């Protein structure tokens, strides 16, 4: 179950006025998926789907992270993005 602080951070990301860059967006995506869905599942997308492949790889890097820890890391990144 997602914490209120995590849900607030998710909403904050939607309102960002500055693009944090692909690396940060992939990290946020991976942590969000880990926090809400657990470890990555399914097969890795093929070379014809580079965006899907990048998302899958980012999520796979955080596999094994506890959902609570993924939430905490997500919140910390959003806190840094919104304070600068």
Image (cartoon, grey):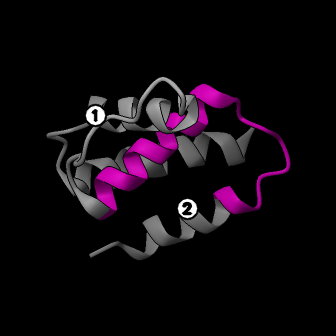
Mark 1–mark 2 Cα distance, whole angstroms, equals 22 Å
Q: Quadrant of residue 3?
A: bottom left
Q: In the rendered structure, which disc, 1 or 2, sits on the residue that comes first in sequence?
A: 2
Depth order, front residue of 39/9: 39
- Marks 1,2: beta carbons within 8 A: no
Kind of element beneath mark 1: helix
Q: Quadrant of residue 83?
A: top right
Task: Say which residue label 1 marks.
Answer: 60
**Residue 9, which numbered label?**
2
Instruction: Report the residue at 26% width, 76% height from top.
Output: 1
Residue lying at the far right of the rendered structure? 17
| Residue 16 image offset from top left, x and y in percent | 77, 53
**61 magenta-colored:** no
| Residue 58 image offset from top left, x and y in percent | 40, 32
Relative side of 38 to 5, left or right: left
Instruction: Report the residue at 70% width, 48% height from top.
Output: 82
Q: Which residues are magenta?
A: 13-36
Relative side of 51 to 67, left or right: right
């Amino acid at each position: 179950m997602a914490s209120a602080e995590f849900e607030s951070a998710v909403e904050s990301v939607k309102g960002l006025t500055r693009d944090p860059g692909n690396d940060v967006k992939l990290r946020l995506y991976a942590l969000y998926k880990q926090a809400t869905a657990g470890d990555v599942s399914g097969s890795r997308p093929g070379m014809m789907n580079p965006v899907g492949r990048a998302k899958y790889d980012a999520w796979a890097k955080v596999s094994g992270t506890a959902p609570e820890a993924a939430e905490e890391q997500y919140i910390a990144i959003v806190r840094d993005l919104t304070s600068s």
